[in-house]
Image (cartoon, grey):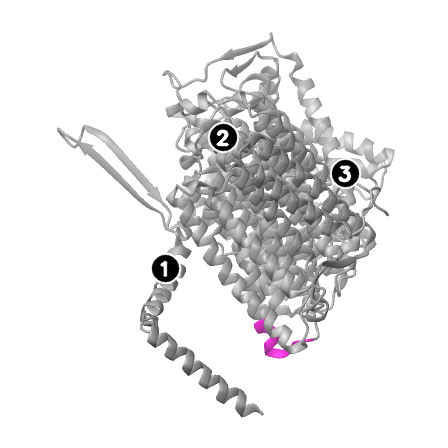
Amino acid sequence: MGFPFPLPADAIPAALAVRLLTVAATLCLARRPTACRLVAFGGSVIASVATFLVAATVVFSGVSGRGSLFRHAASGAAVAYSVSPLSAWFLLVLGLLAVPIAVYSVGYLAHAVPASRSAFVGAAFNVLIGAIETVFVADDVIGFLFAWELMSLTTTLLVATEHENRASRRSAYLYLVMSHVGTGCLVAGFFILASMSGSLSFATLLSGGLATGRLRDILFLLFFLGFGVKAGVVPLHVWLPEAHPAAPSSISALMSAVLIKAGVYGLFKVCAFGLGTPRMSWGLALMAVGAVSAVLGVLYALQQNDLKRLLAYSTIDNVGIILLSLGSAMTVLASGHGELASVGIAASLYHVLNHAVFKGLLFLGAGSVVMALGTRHIEAMGGLLRRMPWTGLFFLIGAGSIAGLPLLNGFVSEWLAFQSLLLGFQATPGLERLNFPVAGALLALTSALAAACFVKAFGITFLARPRSRAAEGAHEAPMVMLVPQAFLAVLCVLLGLFPGVVLRVLGPVMAGLPGLRPAGEMVRGAVMIAPGPGRFDQVSPAALAAVVLAGVSLAALLGRRAYGGLRRTPTWACGGQLDAQMEYTATAFSKPLMMIFRAVYRPTREVEALAEVSPYFPREVRFRAEIEPTFERFVYAPLTRGVLRVAEEMKILQAGSLHAYLAYVLALGVVLLIWLGGEQ
Amino acid sequence: MIDGTPFGLLLALLQAGIMLAAAPLLRGVIKKMKASLQTRQGPPVLQVYYDLGKLLRKERVRSDTATWVYAAGPRVYFATALAAAVLVPVVFAAAPFEGAGGILLLVGTLALGRFALAVAALDTGSPFGGMGSSREMTIAALAEPALMLGLFASALAAGSLGLGEIVRGALARGVSFHPSEWLAAAALFLVLIAEAGRIPVDNPATHLELTMIHEAMVLEYSGPDLALVEWASSIKELVFVTLLIDLFGPLGIATSITPLALAMGLLAWLIKVLALAVALTLVESTNAKLRLFRVPELMATSLGLGFLAMAIRFL
């Protein structure tokens, strides 16, 4: 099956050049914000469409394209790129999201970000996407690490867009520190591999035969830590709920939808398929980390009342689902089941796409809401569906998708994840197999909690009466911000109703990964998929859609005998007048789950009654409830204290005396001379 | 096996009709039995039908705060209950729409309906709706892992997640008294109680704000909207009962397409539904409603039973 608009991989350097030109033009136009925005995001759209076409060509044909980005004639050094089907899949996801986000940004920056920063955000946006693209296609260590670092630094700048705000600066700093811990692990891992092979090319480094025994485990751990930080898995996630909400909403969408997928890409490329056949223990470890991330991510998301923070925590939950499927695939791959492993890989890669689409959509919707109201606090929202009908509709579709409801895309990848767990259970011998049903139960818990979380996120935000003056006066976002959301919402539906098409496209991607043998029977027409040959299971959401439509029509028909027309009356409020104060709040909505999972949350609450005359007649009651930031307090706080203490001790070395420093240089020179001289 | 054929479509219509017609009867029978255990006379068995008929003819009254989401909730809930009804085998050893998917799709379909109704409940601005919606989603979240594990235990024994395949596999293997079946059945019975909103988890007869869950969620609905919600809830209950029958006691279900076999299948199904109705009535009459925060313990028991069922069968 060919792609109708093929574009050779040679277009990748051209697309990156377009981005560089766009950045230059954007910075030149900094004084004219409107033109600057149009140039920045127009250029971005052109480059993204080109990369999307290249990616689609490679994914459909299954044939990699390669070349070099940059060649230094004198030394012969070159930075090579290669678009393998796996990188093409991630590029495809990036292209699919980058275009609507760029269009949305034109409107969003005009209204929600000071005009003086348009040039900065526009330029940084292009640099960031270019860096992510380079990460996906880099074919040697130097190019990869350069792009990786550029990506982290640009993100830090974007998180600090509102740098006059202390919290934003703190988030950016936290992000910077965490990313560099991760990058440090990656550098160590790549250098070990490079010193073993004497090459810097991925083709040699990741051929799988280099390391053996204990060293292989150490490498796995290093790369897992390095990529895990970027992917935001528990317990390396602490930066994510701080950094994602702090950035402008269109950037949050890009970060949540695509940026964290760079970490997932690394886990795929190196941890799962770059270090030889994975060991069963790696797979089980990834499953465990994935399950914990999924459950904790959604549990924390449930208790957030900041709309963007809620979405950020739910990103941790979805990365958990992606890793859970990847882990189950690696576990069965370790025992040589290439067909069954492809089910898990399909679930994982499908969820990468799905999460990008619905989370991008939800962040864009949240951005419109925040722009209209000027606050991210859910308790100040309400009644927005009447004021922002389209944003509300698209947000509802995104909420249904993320809750894993059938007819929408989230259901399909979760369905595949369940299949991969059940097949893994059947294929794994011994006691280890019991990990699979436990993971299945946790996945079921995650998806049900996500449903509760997004009933709250949508219901409290968009339904009932406005809870604040700002919500009362909210207006619908402009067309340029609605069309991208409509596009993503339609994608949510299409990806949910035509899973066969997606799996057919994924076929060459999976066939290109070592050890996988995807069964052709997984695709049963455009609307039906199965986990493999035989009658284990199959699903066709489109058939369900037909039945549900018939059911809805019957329901409408049943109501036709009703007396008279439709009468509107005020909501009954036990005899009083209903006002927004009486509505159920977001805090109240998630309170039962807070009580049930109090072992996880360790909530604290303070009620303070301020009274003047008698304690029975308080003038004011103050209520404060919060959940304990377990990881921050018990993992990171001791770590930070330790680092600071070591730094304090090392101050002795940094005495500020020039003589001492000269002595260090001398001493180092002598030591090196002795050391190197001794080798000859 | 039969989907896509004219017979499949006919069976789908027939089965949807049977489920639509029989679901209120199950409620009526349970109410009557409960009343007689309390030495009351109770309402007539057919009272549920009279109520539905009356509600469907009443005037539509909706809150002026509510939007289209409020109107869509009951319709989607009804449609998903109906869809669930054709995803399980009832009188014939194949579900009319088993090509559409197995137990995972069934669970997903019910989740879709619950989501639609829970969102709609927040639309009127009444605190009752929010309270009910919050509690319903909480209990659903606790019941879901238990439900999945119980279903997996049975499905993996049959080597398929398709309900038709599970039923046919169970028929081929004959009656089994493997202890894992008992454990899985017990696990799913607890989930049935939670999903059907029965005592000790929820009390369908109460309108006391401290205790109601599902009723609080639909408190604002009236007339035809309420009729759809009530009807759909009863269909959902019947689907769960049928699911239990399919997984643990499919004996008697029709395996050939002859009028006699189908009639026998219908009779066997009715008898088994009645037996489970008696069990539900006894549980409901001999237990007190649990506090909301005791429900997690019940669900954890169910989860443990499901896990045990898997462990003893496959180790």
Point out the tag, 1 or 2, that comes first from the N-terminus: 2
Q: Which mark is drawn over residue A637?
A: 1
Report the magenta residues as a range: A210-219
Give the amino acid type for the residue marked by disc 1 in the picture: Ala
Quadrant showing the N terminus of chain B: top right
Tell which tag, 3 or 2, sits nearer the viewer: 2
**Cα–Cα gap, marks 3 and 1:** 55 Å
- Give how far across and how far down residue B90 sits, in percent: 73, 39
**Cα–Cα gap, marks 3 and 2:** 46 Å
Residue at the (65%, 53%) spot, across then down: B152
Chain under callout 1: A
Q: How many marks?
A: 3
Q: Which mark is drawn over residue B97?
A: 3
Quadrant showing the C terminus of chain B: bottom right
- Give how far across and how far down residue A608 sits, in percent: 24, 38
Residue position marked by numbered label 2 in the rendering: A371
- Tag 1 and tag 2 share a subunit: yes
